[in-house]
Image: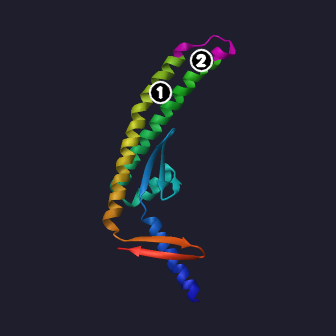
């Protein structure tokens, strides 16, 4: 019974420790990715985590809207560029006006993607700042051989 109580206590502290971790936004080749500790999060998961912080949540909602518009413009532009190129490679008569329109859509998607990066970064700054202000303690689990050490710093 005593081991069970310690197990519940350690799991509770580990959950609190994971809850207090900041979220970081890392730029990658295809866009950005969100990480919390070593866990990779989707934009929807980040949105769910920010729900309890209204300012950060509202900012991230606008960022996701920008991301959706930018993604749709970029994808549509890519299809419109790809169709004439594929037709030309197959030996047909390509419609280069479609490629020009697709290039314009791709260029139009760039400001939306930049706005997403800016607003998402600001939302995460708000969230991480509120974590630092409200949680002044830190719990660390360290594994040593066959044992574990729980270190709580204030």
Q: Is residue 33 above or below residue 96?
A: below
Q: Kindly identify which residue carries mark 2.
A: 84
Q: Residue at x 40, y 41 (%)?
A: 116
| Quarter of the image that includes the C terminus | bottom left
Stretch in magenta: 87-97
Q: Residue at x 36, y 44 (%)?
A: 119
Query: In this view, which residue lies farthest toward the bottom?
Result: 1
Q: Secondary structure at mark 1?
A: helix
Q: Residue at x 45, y 65 (%)?
A: 19
Quadrant of the rendered image containing residue 85: top right
Dot 2 surroundings within 10 Å: few (below 14), some, or many (20 or more)?
many
Q: Kindly identify which residue carries mark 1.
A: 106
| Quarter of the image that includes the N terminus | bottom right
Kindly report the distance in space between the C-alpha atoms of the residues bearing marks 2 and 1: 15 Å
Q: Is residue 114 above or below residue 41?
A: above
Q: At which x and y percent is residue 152?
A: 41, 75
């Amino acid at each position: 019974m005593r081991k069970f109580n310690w197990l519940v206590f350690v799991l509770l502290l580990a959950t609190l420790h994971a809850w207090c971790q900041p979220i970081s936004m890392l730029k990658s080749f295809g866009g950005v990715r969100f990480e919390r500790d070593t866990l990779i999060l989707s934009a929807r998961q980040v949105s769910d985590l920010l729900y309890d912080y209204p300012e950060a949540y509202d900012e991230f909602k606008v960022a996701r809207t920008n991301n959706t518009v930018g993604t749709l413009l970029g994808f549509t532009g890519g299809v419109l560029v790809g169709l004439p190129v594929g037709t030309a490679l197959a030996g047909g008569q390509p419609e280069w006006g479609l490629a020009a329109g697709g290039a314009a859509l791709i260029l139009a998607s760039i400001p939306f993607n930049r706005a997403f990066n800016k607003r998402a970064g600001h939302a995460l700054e708000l969230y991480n700042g509120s974590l630092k202000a409200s949680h002044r303690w830190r719990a660390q689990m360290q594994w040593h051989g066959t044992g574990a050490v729980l270190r709580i710093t204030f």
